[in-house]
Image: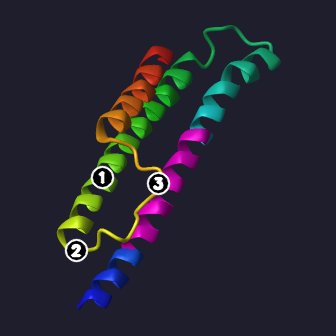
Amino acid sequence: MLKQRQNAAGQLTKRLFATEEALDEAICKIGDLIGYMPEARTTANLSAVVGQEAISEATETLKAMVAARGHLVATHNRLAEVRDQIGLQVMAMGSTEMKPPMQAKEKDENIINMVDNAA
């Protein structure tokens, strides 16, 4: 029974980490896109009004992705609680440096505030 739980937890952890990595990569890519849009407009010698709505929409996409990342972090924390509930405390689900919940929440809020201010 313990071995089955460990195997299931290991498979779940792999999927969780892959999802976290993919979401972080997507955030980086949309950030790169947003950052390049004004440069592309300038390079093409276009008016500042050209593409403004596209930048706004891309920024909303980034904001939604950052919010989704916050939910994924919360999912990670909930899964850690489940891990402990089923007796698998010895299995780590993340870096060896665990963050206190308030510190993690504060960091998430800081990221969301940065995105809100950029919009």
Q: Quadrant of the N terminus?
A: bottom left
Residue at the spot of label 1? 77
Give the residue type that dot 3 points to. Answer: Glu
Query: For residue 15, what is the image quadrant?
Result: bottom left
- Separation of residues labelled 2 and 1 (CA atoms): 16 Å
Front residue (pair 28, 53):
28
- The residue lying at 37 percent from left, 71 percent from top is 91
Residue 18, x across and y down, in percent: 50, 63
Magenta segment boundaries in residue numbering: 12-28
Residue 54 x/y as whole percent? 54, 25
Q: Are marks 2 and 3 in contact (CB under 8 Å)?
A: no
Tell whether 119 sits left or right of 82. right
Q: Residues within 10 Å of mark 2 (few under 14, many from 20)?
A: few
Residue beneath label 3, please? 20
Question: What residue did someone put label 2 on?
Answer: 87
**Precedes in sequence: disc 3 or disc 1:** 3
Residue at the location (66% across, 25% down)?
35
| Closer to us: 81 or 53 | 81
Q: Is residue 103 inside the magenta stretch?
A: no
Above or below: residue 94 compared with residue 51: below
